[in-house]
Amino acid sequence: MEMKPIPPEQSLIEYPSEFPIKIMGAMHDAFAQTMVEVVTLHDPTFHAGKMDMRPSSKGTYLSVTVTVWATSRDQLDNLYRALSGHPMVKVVL
């Protein structure tokens, strides 16, 4: 599904800026590092220090919040597609 371009004056995001994204998936030893690798492909300035991790109350799931340097809507759209299409990811917010 192709998204229509949003004129800059109608965007709710001002570019460039820091932008948090929450990613949730099943608890797995490599989940956090894998998400760092995916995010870094879209934001080369990203590093693990810009990530907050929280396990679910039963330890079944892991939620990571990454803060990326958003430079454009295309960048964010591509990142969301990469994350939501990843087999380890259940939800991207």
Image (cartoon, rainbow, N blue to C red):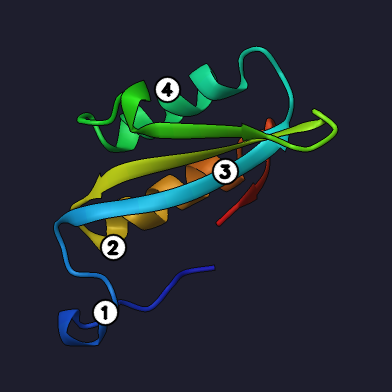
The amino acid at mark 3 is Ile
Residue shown at 24%/51% (left/top)? 18
Spatial CA distance of label 4 from label 2 is: 20 Å
Pinpoint residue 10: horizontal percent, then vertical percent: 24, 87
Pinpoint residue 31: horizontal percent, then vertical percent: 61, 22
Spatial CA distance of label 1 from label 4 is: 28 Å
Q: Quadrant of the C terminus?
A: bottom right
Spatial CA distance of label 4 from label 3 is: 13 Å
The residue pinned by badge 3 equals 23
- Who comes first in sequence, dot 3 or dot 2? 3
The residue pinned by badge 1 equals 11
Compare residues 50 and 10 and report the one nearer the observer: 50
Residue 79 is marked as: none
Which image quadrant for residue 49? top left
The residue pinned by badge 4 equals 37
SS for dot 4: helix
The amino acid at mark 1 is Ser
Spatial CA distance of label 3 from label 2 is: 18 Å
